[in-house]
Image (spheres, rainbow, N blue to C red):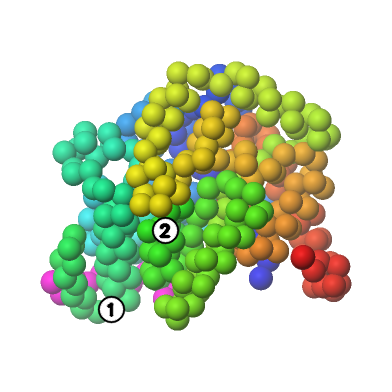
């Protein structure tokens, strides 16, 4: 299987870096509709709409994720559309019905990213209880079990600690078989165990090749114990320029112009996210100021350099089990189409070479 490519939909204001550097991007639907059409033309496979309900890291304006992907469905043809949702703010039965509808509207291209939640204030403002770290993942696991049951069974019953379904059903069923693809994120042991049991895809924050290898191996082993397999997606911030020096100069400029107040505010909001897990290894547990300028540790993945260097780095991640690269960009208007035209074809060439000369790609 070839590695796949996704991009963060910029459906929130402020772009994908917490910096005052000028960014050629926009959060409006009109912009995002054109961007999605461009993305599928240049080789992207998925688009992920973010879920935010109040301003954080400077994101003052937000288009809601489910309704955004529903609106993108009729203006795209091939792109798979991922909407992020928070258990606790949504009921899984309602999301199952909405997801089946969007899947029908899109011809089977709807996907869901179940976000257990790190931003306490988003729950507090709506009067929802803020659960302990591992309890949030237990709720998310039940959320996914309800989704899968209602999408695949004619009459679904469920009795859990968080949800009850008494003969629920969804008609029409989703077109995607056996159901729309379900993504989840996280870094903690609770997140990894949940992925092994119920999720189709596991999103990883930006990380080194060795850091990614460790997560892939652990979750794959857990999934095998469950009789399942899980696919892996990796967050990355792509800075592709004519020279390596130019790409790193842009990175330095982004960090130098960081919105210090917003970065520190984001850091305060997430400082307990990683530490709150039992083993103190959750998301952002080891993120410094520079890492937090790109709020999913995208700089750590290292897609910074020439097109050839970035394509080779993607090959390295593919070799340790990454199935999808989720890209963020500084200048979406220019950088997304350039990545599609200049990097993705190089990756495809490397994949073709790997198939014909596999001994060249043996990793140590």
Q: Is mark 1 on a helix, strand or loop?
A: loop
Q: What element carries label 2?
A: helix
- Is residue 191 placed above or below 59 in the rendered structure? below
Expressed as whole percent of the image width and height from the top left, the position of residue 231 reads 54, 66
Left or right: residue 364 versus residue 57 is right
The one nearer the camera, 263 or 127, is: 263
- Is 169 one of the magenta-colored residues? yes
Q: What stretch is highlighted in magenta?
A: 166-178
Q: Residues within 10 Å of mark 1 (few under 14, many from 20)?
A: some
The one nearer the camera, 78 or 88, is: 88
Residue drawn 50% across and 19% down? 260
- Is residue 26 placed above or below 173 in the rendered structure? above
Residue drawn 80% across and 61% down? 350
Expressed as whole percent of the image width and height from the top left, the position of residue 141 reads 31, 63
Disc marking residue 153: 1
Disc 2: which residue: 189
Left or right: residue 79 versus residue 210 is left
The one nearer the camera, 165 or 141, is: 141
Residue drawn 68% across and 29% down? 251
Q: Is residue 207 visible?
A: yes
Q: Can residue 31 be seen in this view?
A: no
């Amino acid at each position: 299987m070839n590695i796949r490519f996704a991009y963060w939909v910029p459906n929130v204001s402020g772009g994908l870096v917490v910096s005052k550097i000028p960014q050629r991007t926009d959060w409006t639907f009109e912009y995002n509709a054109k961007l999605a059409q461009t993305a599928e033309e240049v080789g992207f496979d998925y688009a992920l709409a973010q879920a935010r309900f109040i301003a954080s890291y400077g994101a003052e304006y937000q288009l809601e994720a489910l309704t955004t992907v529903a609106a993108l469905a009729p203006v795209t043809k091939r792109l798979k559309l991922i909407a992020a949702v928070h258990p606790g703010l949504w009921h899984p039965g309602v999301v199952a019905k909405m997801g089946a509808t969007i899947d029908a509207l899109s011809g089977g291209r709807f996907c869901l990213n179940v976000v257990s939640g790190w931003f306490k204030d988003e729950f507090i403002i709506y009067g929802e209880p803020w659960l302990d770290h591992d309890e949030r993942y237990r709720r998310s696991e039940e959320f996914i079990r309800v989704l899968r049951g209602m999408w695949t069974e004619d009459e679904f019953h469920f009795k859990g600690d968080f949800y009850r379904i008494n003969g629920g059903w969804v008609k029409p069923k989703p077109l995607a078989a056996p159901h729309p693809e379900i993504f989840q994120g996280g870094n903690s042991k609770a997140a990894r165990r949940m992925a092994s049991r119920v999720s189709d895809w596991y999103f990883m924050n930006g990380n080194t090749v060795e850091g990614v290898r460790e997560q892939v191996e652990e979750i794959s082993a857990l999934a095998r114990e469950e009789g399942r397999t899980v696919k892996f997606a990796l967050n990355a911030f792509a800075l592709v320029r004519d020279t390596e020096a130019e790409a790193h100069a842009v990175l330095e400029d982004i960090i130098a112009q960081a919105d210090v107040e917003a970065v520190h505010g984001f850091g305060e909001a997430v400082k307990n996210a990683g530490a709150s897990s039992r083993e103190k290894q959750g998301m952002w547990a080891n993120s410094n100021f520079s890492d937090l300028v790109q709020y999913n540790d995208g700089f750590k993945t290292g897609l910074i350099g020439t097109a050839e260097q970035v394509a080779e780095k993607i090959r390295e991640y593919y070799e340790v089990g990454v199935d999808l690269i989720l890209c963020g960009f500084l200048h979406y208007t220019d950088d997304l189409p350039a990545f599609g035209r200049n990097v993705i074809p190089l990756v495809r060439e490397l994949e073709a070479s790997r198939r014909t000369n596999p001994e060249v790609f043996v990793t140590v």
